Amino acid sequence: MAGDFARSLESPQTVAGFAYSIIKDKLSKDYYQRYLQRLDSVSKEDVLAMSKKYFTSTNCNIVVVGNEEIIESLKKFDSDGKIEFLDAFAEEVKDIKPATISKDELIDKYLFAVSLTSNKKELAKKVKKVKSYERVIDMTSPQIPIPLKMTEYFVSPTTEAQKMEGQGMVFQKTFCDGNSGFKFDMQSGKKDMTADELASKKKSSGLFPEMNYITNGTNYELTGIENDNGNEYYVLKLIDGENVSYDYYNTTTYLKEKSISIQKAGEETNESTTTYNDYKNVSGILFPHSLTISVGPMNLIGKVSKMELNGKIDLKSLKE
């Protein structure tokens, strides 16, 4: 639980939820800073007593991970003999059709679509002209009745920063210039990025990270075509160590409309889903102006209020 709590601080939704709890429930400002101390005081006897009280044979589900060959042998353990098949997100398994193009053809079609170009030379020329961008996203959530603002920065070639704030407080902040970086949240303070975090950040950096998949060693594969809410999507799977993500590209427009991220650390797994909608032309490039971020029961709805290319960005203030 201690490890899960620490990793949860990397999620903007979780940090925002903690901040709201402090305000709503009038908690002390160091409430979550002392969380681990209180957790450490819980004994294994306390945990065992609670498990005996609440985890009984009448309220448990049996979850099995394995090959299809064992299905018949499992039916005897089910009360009605019917087994539900779920994917990694606890959703019912859907049929996936074979893709009609290759993974690299998909990436090219996506890049041409968002850049409004028709070949790689035009694409490279247009992307090269973008030296920086600043995107401001106004965030709302049914679980958090206070306004939040997330600001994202990019400075070519590899500098990126992000800040989540609300009611005069900075809840979360990250900065990376390709060689070094840090993460900050109001619970644990400022911490330098590890070598693994920097390596992962480099792979996903740039105006369009997909442009560098072939050259930076990104492990990716096209799993097929999946139907989601009546729309068909090419599903691109990316593998980064134990972390896996799935990007969904519309088979008609080739725009990316959803990303699912599964991050593992030890025995803990954190999942999040981001959707992208309302693509608009900004200086000849399409950017989504509406998005949702979901982690468990927490949902954030974002509307882009500012999207500026090649404006002046104060890197010094971002490093502080």
Image (spheres, helix red, strand yellow):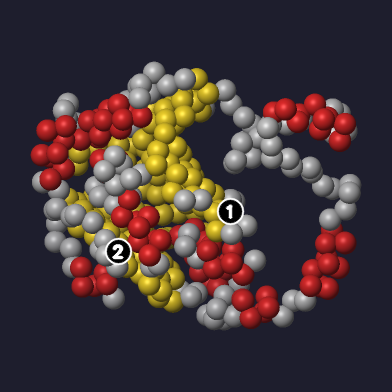
Task: Identify the residue position indicated by label 2 in the image.
Answer: 176
Q: In which quarter of the image is the C terminus?
A: bottom left
Residue 112, how many percent across, how many down? 22, 30
Question: Residue 199's image quarter?
Answer: bottom left
Q: Quadrant of the N terminus?
A: bottom right
Residue 283, how many percent across, how many down? 15, 41
- Tell me if mark 2 has few (under 14), some (14-19) or many (20+) residues whose alpha carbon lies within 10 angstroms of its own: many
Task: Identify the residue position indicated by label 1 in the image.
Answer: 269
N-term-proximal mark, 1 vs 2? 2
| Residue type pointed to by label 1 | Thr
Q: Which residue is drawn at 58% across and 53% down?
A: 269
Does residue 53 appear to the left or right of 102 in the view shown?
right
Residue 110, how many percent across, how many down? 29, 31
Q: Nearer the viewer, residue 91 or 219?
A: 219
Does residue 81 appear to the left or right of 42 in the view shown?
right
| Residue type pointed to by label 2 | Cys
Q: Is residue 26 visible?
A: no
Q: Vertically, is 60 above or below 67?
A: below
